[in-house]
Image (tube, rainbow, N blue to C red):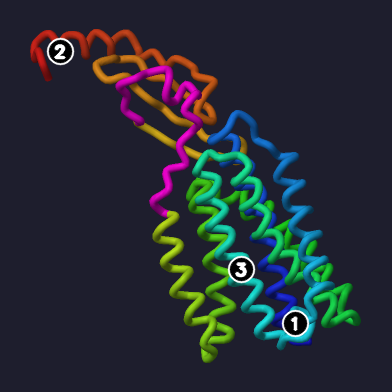
Amino acid sequence: MQASYVVFTFLISTTALALQLAFTRILSVLFWQHLVYAIVTISLLGFAMSGTALQLFSRLRTMKTASFVQFCFSGFAGTSLLAVAAVNSHHLFLSYLASTFPFFFFGLFVLGMFQRYPEKTGMLYAANLLGSAAGSLLYLLTISAFGALGLIQICVFFPCALVAFFYAEERLPRTMTLFLLLSLLLTAKLDLSPDRTKQFWTLVADKTVELTRWNPISRVDVIRANQSLHRHLLIDGDAQALMVPPADRVLADVKFQWQHPGS
């Protein structure tokens, strides 16, 4: 067994765990619940489906390991971005269905490595566990800086870029890279807006979103009603708190508007 397969196991385990955590944050914003139990169930379902597929389809067991690696990573990357787009549709069943497939390809890769190299099960399992721990750290260290969508793009791009580089002379990595770049550009346009029944939309009709920040436990938005001095702080698109400016700031703004009407 090549050492690269242990590295690939570590990488896909890292990204799969970070992806799970990112999905809990996204669902908490888009819907009315973080749905952690649903994400855990979906990931286990995808893992179980991969074991069934590996048993039923002999082609998955007999294909060259290099082709199997590329197949699993391509599937993981493509379905991860597809799942984000599906979740952004605000259709709960479609979100559940699409979110299963990244974990199907993750499970398929890990189980496929176990099946191909049973004598190295301990090393592969250690890479899987360490990768999952690293995924938790990756989530904590990156979501505040890049947001949930940026974190998912990181999870998709870097492992696949490494696989494409490792198999640079083969055709599939070149195709995978082009597909990946196109998908990243498309998903970058997603806005991940909260559910339309949340206070992000219903509290103020004519508003300006002054700040949006993600953190490991929530997304924080600061909105201001146009022609108003007050701001509202929203957690995951709801649970608003009123932000009142200091008295001297209020007086200064009132004086400015009195001296410059219509500005």
> Which is more foreground, mark 3 or mark 1?
1
Q: Are marks 2 and 1 in contact (CB under 8 Å)?
A: no
> Which is more foreground, mark 2 or mark 3?
3
Label 2 to label 1: alpha-carbon separation: 73 Å
User: Label 1 amino acid?
Assistant: Arg
> Which is more foreground, mark 2 or mark 1?
1
The residue singled out by tag 1 in the image is 59
Tell me which segment is drawn in magenta.
188-209
**Above or below — where is 230 with respect to 173?**
above
Q: Position of residue 195 (x, y in %)?
A: 50, 31
Residue at screen point 60% across, 39% down: 92
Please, what is the dominant secondary structure of the magenta stretch?
loop
User: Label 2 amino acid?
Assistant: Gln
User: Label 3 amino acid?
Assistant: Gly
The residue singled out by tag 2 in the image is 257
**Above or below — where is 204 with respect to 48?**
above
The residue singled out by tag 3 in the image is 75
Residue at screen point 9% across, 15% down: 260
Sequence-wise first label, 3 or 1:
1
Q: Are marks 3 and 1 in contact (CB under 8 Å)?
A: no
**Above or below — where is 212 with respect to 17?**
above
